[in-house]
């Protein structure tokens, strides 16, 4: 009887077990690069069609070929009494110097504002006062105080980038889990250890996001500043080209700015993945 029961049990088919994958939320993990490339191709095709059909005169909308030839000429011969590398390096020097100063000042101030009521009371008023102002609003004041040299441009860029970094660092402190803080204190962590091991790692994703936003603000401010008071730089190159109605060179300048901004954004994303791989995983 037992053998018959065992044989009958073996003859019963196993249930069909299916592994169900949980659906993600939002964009998900699939790459958006093909979509972005397709969108870029459509934009270029529309630009080529509009310029070839002469919907707008070539003086105002050059063809992609004309812009490409202008880019080759800019690379080989330069423009506005400077080579391409001199224009680009001048802008990179200003933006990198100002970003380093803004991060070195903004992160400690933001952390202090998030941790101390006195620090927040001291720094909150001036930051909230000048942060909504367009940087070009106080550019004339920078020129009056510091002249038209590099000091005025770097100071202007530092002020433009300081506020978003400080505000992001403050928001990062507020996002720290209270359970982690209490756990560290219960294990005997000192204030410095608490700041280094709990507060700073928890606030790091917010700080990096603030730095990305600040660099974007810095690029727009830099180009605008170079339009007014500079002899070299990408903004000066664009302004010089526009004065002679060299629209193809203006397009080249816009493309160079876009490439530099994209490179900075890509570098910040890589840095974010390296320093804060846990972002978005909680």
Image: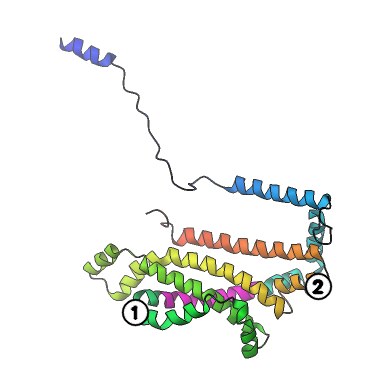
Q: Which residue is mark 2?
A: 243
In the rendered image, residue 117, in percent from the top left (x then y), is placed at 34, 79
Give SS at disc 1: helix
Question: Image point 63% across, 76% down: which residue?
Answer: 94
Position of the C terminus, as image quadrant, is bottom left
Position of the N terminus, as image quadrant, is top left
Q: Which residue is mark 1?
A: 117
In the rendered image, residue 236, in percent from the top left (x then y), is placed at 73, 74
Q: Is mark 1 in CB contact (under 8 Å) with mark 2? A: no
- Looking at the image, residue 186 sits to the left or right of residue 26; the answer is left
Question: Image point 52% across, 79% down: which residue?
Answer: 130
| Picture quadrant where residue 76 is located | bottom right
Question: Label 2 neighbourhood size at 10 Å, few (<14), some (14-19), many (20+)?
Answer: few
Residue 194 is marked as none
Q: Main secondary structure of the magenta part?
A: helix
Magenta residue check for 226: no
Magenta residues? 92-110
Tell me: residue 45, above or below residue 133.
above
């Amino acid at each position: 009887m037992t053998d018959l029961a065992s044989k009958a049990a073996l003859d019963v088919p196993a249930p069909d077990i299916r592994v169900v994958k949980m659906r993600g939320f939002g964009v998900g993990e699939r790459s958006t690069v093909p979509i972005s490339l397709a969108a870029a191709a459509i934009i270029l095709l529309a630009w080529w069609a509009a310029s070839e059909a002469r919907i707008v005169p070539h003086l105002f909308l050059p063809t992609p070929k004309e812009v490409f030839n202008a880019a080759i000429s800019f690379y080989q011969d330069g423009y506005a009494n400077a080579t391409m590398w001199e224009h680009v390096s001048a802008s990179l020097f200003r933006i990198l110097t100002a970003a380093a100063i803004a991060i070195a000042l903004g992160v400690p101030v933001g952390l202090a504002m998030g941790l101390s009521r006195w620090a927040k009371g001291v720094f909150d008023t001036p930051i909230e006062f000048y942060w909504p102002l367009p940087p070009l609003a106080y550019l004339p004041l920078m020129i009056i105080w510091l002249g038209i040299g590099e000091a005025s441009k770097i100071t202007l860029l530092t002020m433009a980038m300081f506020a978003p970094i400080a505000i992001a660092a403050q928001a990062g402190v507020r996002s720290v889990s209270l359970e982690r803080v209490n756990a560290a204190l219960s294990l005997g962590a000192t204030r410095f250890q608490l700041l280094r091991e709990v507060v700073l790692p928890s606030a790091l994703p917010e700080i990096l996001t603030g730095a990305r936003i600040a660099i974007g603000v810095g690029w727009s401010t830099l180009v605008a500043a170079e339009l007014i008071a500079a002899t070299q730089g990408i903004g000066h190159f664009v302004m010089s080209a526009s004065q002679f109605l060299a629209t193809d060179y203006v397009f080249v300048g816009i493309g160079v700015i876009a490439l530099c901004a994209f490179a900075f954004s890509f570098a910040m994303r890589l840095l974010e993945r390296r320093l804060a791989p846990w972002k978005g995983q909680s």
